[in-house]
Amino acid sequence: MMAVASTTAAPATTESKDDVVLRISNLESFYGPIMAIRGASLIIRRGQIVTVLGANGAGKTTLLKTISGVMDPEKGEILYHDKDIAGSEPDRIVRQGIVHVPEGREVFPLLTVEENLRMGAFTRSDGGIGDDIEMVFGYFPILRERRRQSAGTLSGGQQQMLAIGRGLMARPEVMLLDEPSLGLSPLLVKEIFAIIRRLNVERGVTMLLVEQNAKVALDVAHYGYVMELGRLVMDGPAADLAQSKDVQEFYLGVREDENPRGQRRWKQRKTWR
Amino acid sequence: METIQLLVSGLANGCIYGLIALGFVLIYKATEAVNFAQGDMMMLGAFLTLGFANSNFLGLPFLIAVPLAILSMGVIGYLIDIVIIRRLFGQSQVAIVIVTIALGFVMRFAAGNIFGFEPQTLESPLIGRDVTVGGIFLGLDELLVIIATIGLTVGFWLYFSNTKLGIAMQAASQNQLAAYYMGIPVKRVQSLIWAIAGMMAAVAGILYASKGSIDPNAGLLGIKAFAAAVIGGMGSLPGALLGGIIVGMIEPFASRYIPAGYSQVMPYLLLFLMLVFRPHGILAQVHRKKV
């Protein structure tokens, strides 16, 4: 793995080791015979939004599924507060404070909005569930209006809000967000990401955000990784990544119009190859 | 007069079909596979009650035998899931269907070897007692079937819509993956659904046996109940009950007004028409995912 040369302060190294919430090392996961994650290592610090960028099929979703226990890794460690949770059952992982908000919303279509939220708190048995539903309604007022409506009748954006709200109901320390911008209009994407930022600041939820929309992801994130074909090929503070030529060319779609020879190369070679 | 009597006996029949159909739909919704042993589970439930209650077997009091049989079928349903069905996880649905058909055969022959292949009567306190309501002559057994079914349905409705585990069962059947993400122990929930289906089959079996005799082939009734589930809308619990009642209602009227031979075909004719014109059933729960 190659770190991007960073001119600004490197925030990660100066902080204490206790800040590390999730430390993943040399993770390998298979989809049947296909090796979807080829030795990924990453670190997530408390209170940060960490994003993993990458194209379709890079292995981003598999990475999240492996962390949340829906898939078991073949090799490697997932240390959550220095405890290896690799291969645990999903309900145990949710209980410990990691919740996965899946790609494509995946609400319970025939349950009402409120029942969906209650299912998010399935692993809890404390008395604060009602208050937390109100808290979710505070972030997503439209859900309050639709609380008795079945989730399948909501619009795509509302379903995404419900999926995030349902995840919050588990009172997670870490939230794994898979493509929250998928299939949403630019305005809705802005709205959702504003709330993601608020949740991070106001409720201190640490987030691992997987996105194809690199621009919004780097905007909101503190730190970023780039994933390609199952490998994390690059990492750095989000602001530095956004400035990096490779990320600009391949993930932000910024055209490199001038190079030393005054002509645009038809195909840029990636520096990590 | 006669019409009302036909109506009541049709309703009583239909309730039993409906209860078996409920079992079909429950398991279908939870595991997306059809349990073709549901009818045989009903038969087994009836025979277990008979084994507990009849004086030539254990001879326990009827009111003890009934809950004991229901509980045993619950345990059997649970075990079927954790010992057999769970191992087929990830296999095609056809594999599960074939396994449940095989399970049905096993239950049929197990019951035959233990209890004999001859029809037997459950020594139920209800058999042969009648009540007269306003000049209409009704069997107590038939009335009880209807009352028990209504009670059971209301109970299940309350359970599924109000308890945390009940809603989790709905959630797991609507979106299994999301249920996993929320920390719902999906596998255990599925085993519990098999247990419930087993208990439901036992109730249906007890009610069936109190209306007449029971033999190891009684489980073939399950085919009619399956037709009921499809007519009502596979995947809809109220639909299962409705389909059961429709099929049950058709039978007495068909055998009264249509020549024998043709009358038995009527439920299947309805199934056929249903599949042609409204393949999702009467109360279909069709949901398309938004992209």
Image (cartoon, coloured by chain):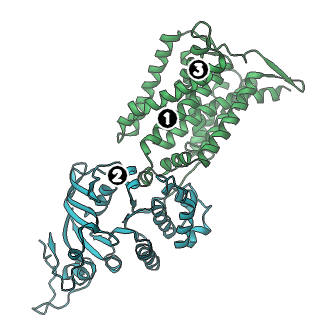
Answer yes or no: do the residues labelled 2 and 1 have beta carbons within 8 Å?
A: no
The residue positioned farthest toward the bottom in the image shown = A262
Q: Chain of mark 2?
A: A
Q: Chain of mark 1?
A: B
Q: CA distance from mark 3 to mark 2?
A: 40 Å
Question: Are labels 2 and 1 on one chain?
Answer: no
Crowding at dot 1, Cα within 10 Å, few <14 / some 14-19 / many 20+, comes out as many
- In the rendered structure, the answer to whether residue A49 lies left or right of residue B132 reads left
Q: Position of residue B94 (x, y in %)?
A: 40, 36
- In the rendered structure, the answer to whether residue A203 lies left or right of residue A268 reads right
- Residue A81 visible to the viewer: yes
> Can you tell which chain is drawn green?
B
> Type of residue at label 2?
Val
Q: Which residue is mark 1?
A: B194
Crowding at dot 2, Cα within 10 Å, few <14 / some 14-19 / many 20+, comes out as many
> Type of residue at label 1?
Trp
Q: CA distance from mark 2 to mark 1?
A: 23 Å
Please identify the quarter of the rendering in which residue B221 is found: top right
Give me the disc on residue B46. Answer: 3
Q: Chain of mark 3?
A: B
Give the structural element (helix, strand or loop) at label 3. Answer: helix
Q: Which residue is mark 2?
A: A70
Q: CA distance from mark 1 to mark 3?
A: 18 Å
Residue at (72% x, 16% y) in the render: B127
